[in-house]
Amino acid sequence: MSTLDIVLNDLVIANRILANEDIVDAYGHVSIRHPDNPDHFFLARSLAPEFITREDILEFDLEGRVVGSDKRAPYLERFIHGGIFEARPDVMAVVHAHAEDILPFGLTGATPLRPVIHSGSFIGSNVPIWDIADTFGDTNLLVANAEQGRDLAKCLGKNNVALMRGHGFAAAARSLIEVVRMSVYLPRNARALQKAKVLGGDIKYLSQGEIDARNRGYSPYSVETWRAWEYWANKAGVGHLATRPDQAKK
Amino acid sequence: MSTLDIVLNDLVIANRILANEDIVDAYGHVSIRHPDNPDHFFLARSLAPEFITREDILEFDLEGRVVGSDKRAPYLERFIHGGIFEARPDVMAVVHAHAEDILPFGLTGATPLRPVIHSGSFIGSNVPIWDIADTFGDTNLLVANAEQGRDLAKCLGKNNVALMRGHGFAAAARSLIEVVRMSVYLPRNARALQKAKVLGGDIKYLSQGEIDARNRGYSPYSVETWRAWEYWANKAGVGHLATRPDQAKK
Amino acid sequence: MSTLDIVLNDLVIANRILANEDIVDAYGHVSIRHPDNPDHFFLARSLAPEFITREDILEFDLEGRVVGSDKRAPYLERFIHGGIFEARPDVMAVVHAHAEDILPFGLTGATPLRPVIHSGSFIGSNVPIWDIADTFGDTNLLVANAEQGRDLAKCLGKNNVALMRGHGFAAAARSLIEVVRMSVYLPRNARALQKAKVLGGDIKYLSQGEIDARNRGYSPYSVETWRAWEYWANKAGVGHLATRPDQAKK
Amino acid sequence: MSTLDIVLNDLVIANRILANEDIVDAYGHVSIRHPDNPDHFFLARSLAPEFITREDILEFDLEGRVVGSDKRAPYLERFIHGGIFEARPDVMAVVHAHAEDILPFGLTGATPLRPVIHSGSFIGSNVPIWDIADTFGDTNLLVANAEQGRDLAKCLGKNNVALMRGHGFAAAARSLIEVVRMSVYLPRNARALQKAKVLGGDIKYLSQGEIDARNRGYSPYSVETWRAWEYWANKAGVGHLATRPDQAKK
């Protein structure tokens, strides 16, 4: 398989995993930067992630315009992806979703969403809350144009995740496997923190040193990381699509 | 398919979606106004929504009387539907359900159920709590006659949703797709708000301007709305019944 | 079918419903009084309710002794059933279970478990907490002999449900369908109440008049009650076993 | 079947049960001491527990080195098992997992995780919290060498369960069936306690006498314990592998 084939297959897998793990429902999406053209990215047409196949994937430029003549409707909020890919050359993959258990943390700043469990470390030590109203006033809350996408990317800054007030989150990572993993464990980290609040006392967050140590040890094709990707893919019914580039046939 | 065929098919789909999304169990129901006769509406006979087919749908007048000679038992609380259709000519579809996570908000007025997430915007800025005891004293809490249905409709007023104390909710919308969507996201909005309470601090609700902006942009057959309807219908096993009127064969 | 056949079939259905609705897991059981001999009752042998068939049902006397020569192991806690059937001639069916969401209410008396939702009304206005330690000191918390069963029945008194501290609940009703329905809605009522506590303000419980009104209207073979029984039985894969006595073939 | 065959079969069952009961996901593992060589133990290779078969099980010494020439990757955290087996000759089986609902109790010491429900009694009266940072400073939180495994075992001491701050738990028991049962009911006990906190008032924990009474009555092949093992195994699709040593064919 070519690199591009693997990338597109992986994007299908990512969609199915996010659906099966309840990170997305009819809404929410995941993209990957074009491996040969950093100014383009791949994202499905407007369809629930659970149903996405290779045929549903479109190519976009950073302004969110479809590349080519495909007339099928794209996601309204493709500008989230374009904005982040433009601002962050280091980012290879982006997720936007409404995973339910992160929503409370976008409604009040009183308890910041920070890593409390080791699998949550990849969200990073700072998760800013982007409120679309700060710049754009009363909107329908959707990121509906490139300007709004850029504003979100600006709030995200060098962080890995931004909460979007009353809406969801955007996550960015250096690989697709990492952004999926981050998205799956983000709500788990949120639940652990939310429930610890009920128990009282001071909550022990991961230290910056711990977050850094975990980050240094990360590799998408390490035994430990691949184990989860393979597991989630199998549970989502697409295990047969999973390919390790280092083991791919030529 | 005729308009009436599409309407009845859609009502079957709505029943199955509400069951599959845990909005109804053995109890709870959904109705649609007759497209040609605004003084009539369609509602299933007394059966759990998960099992409903076209053959189970009955026609009612606004007093909750079955039209025709069908002797099968109707839902006891059909008066909820009659009352709302009578009071609100703009309403085309009604849901009554006991979705668990909205129940706490009907037990105490201390935290009003208002939109905090964008998908919850359609419940509107004011969700009144109807307490059957206020007018009718000690009852079995069921809306068991036209007078009680009218009292509930009066409390609902121009709003989209009324909570029913110790019982559930009634939702009303200008289309079936909208009332289903509202019913699915109502408990999600409730959960986000309930959990944010634990996090402390001031909760940021959607502004009136945001609610209005979302409402203006709504259309049951927009790409974005249809995507969810199709997704939920597929998950509920009735995707094959879904028809877009603008694409229906003559 | 004979009355006894229907009773035993119904007991199988009850076991399967309670398993499928997460009221019991490997533990928990449901019994019915012998229709012809009020001093005997039927209860399965020691087996997870999800797997129980007609062949697994044993007959017991009120002391918890197996009637006949069946050597298969009975449930250790059959004395819960014997104790309640002995003390309460009006009771026809008993459930004992550990349904998770009722457990917190047995750990602290600060928030009594009382009906807040209409489907929870059947638990009655008073749900006492039985603490086995009050009479028996340090035990393994199981109701392991007739004396303990009688002590629990004494605490239950004329009520429908008793919580068992650190353990679960016992529910008693005038019919099998009612005790199953009560057991399914008991945790739902508990969850609604528990979550309302987080919202603040005074909680509105069902009034005694409302509880009485619902109780008066109850009949196991009413259209509304049968609808739920049939629904739960179908979901549990035993809908084909459900028989209405008034419609049973001779 | 030989004793070793039964042990390895049981280890497969344990893996599947823990996966099916949501105690482990892609991560988490369960081990059993070698029945003939107390200085060795069995643990699967690095694979999600849901997929583990007999062929995936490796043999280790207490330093966490694979016995034999198998080159497949082992779990990174096998040192948890080695450390506990070394320090505790009475322990025959160990589980390490990240079961979500125990995580909050590792984040704050304000509410100790102690038994409140009878099925939680086996976790014992004291569940220490091990914080890897106390001895090892900033790490990636994983137990990645024998020294860290020993430090965890030291914190565990004579107890049955240790929470691992920001990470999960380690449980140790005198039999595989017991450690699985303990692991399944640990999060249930945590949820009951966490929810009781919301209800207010003093929480009634199991007394030391009750914990002792339950412990004395425990036997892995008693009717009551076997019932759960068989139930969980059947639900996980491996009921056919379950064998009672006292009933095994020679």
Image (cartoon, coloured by chain):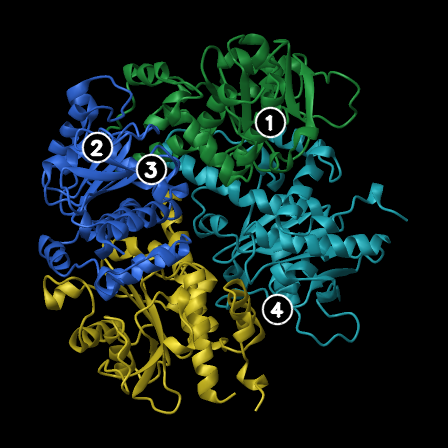
Chain colours: A yellow, B blue, C green, D cyan
Q: What percent of the width, then of the height, locates residue C116?
A: 32, 27
Task: Please give the residue where the numbered disc 4 appears in the rendered image.
Answer: D76
Question: As shown in the figure, which amino acid type bears the numbered disc 3?
Answer: Lys
Task: Please give the residue where the numbered disc 1 appears in the rendered image.
Answer: C9
Q: Nearer the viewer, mark 2 or mark 3?
A: 2
Is C78 rendered above or below residue B99?
Answer: above
Task: Please give the residue where the numbered disc 2 appears in the rendered image.
Answer: B80
Give the letter of the chain under mark 1.
Answer: C
- The answer for how far apart the CA atoms under marks 4 and 3 are is 40 Å
Q: Nearer the viewer, mark 4 or mark 3?
A: 3
Q: What percent of the width, then of the height, locates residue C44?
A: 66, 27
Question: As shown in the figure, which amino acid type bears the numbered disc 4?
Answer: Leu
Residue at 60% across, 42% down: D123
Q: Nearer the viewer, residue B114 or D118?
A: B114
Q: Secondary structure at mark 4?
A: loop
Q: Nearer the viewer, mark 1 or mark 3?
A: 1
Residue at 35% across, 67% down: A125
Residue D101 visible: yes
Question: As shown in the figure, which amino acid type bears the numbered disc 2?
Answer: Ile
Residue neighbourhood size for the residue with mark 4, other residues' Cα within 10 Å, grouped as few (<14), some (14–19), many (≥20)? some
- The answer for how far apart the CA atoms under marks 4 and 2 are is 60 Å
Q: Would you identify the image quadrant in which residue B132 lies?
A: top left
Residue at 45% across, 59% down: A117
Task: Please give the residue where the numbered disc 3 appears in the rendered image.
Answer: C195
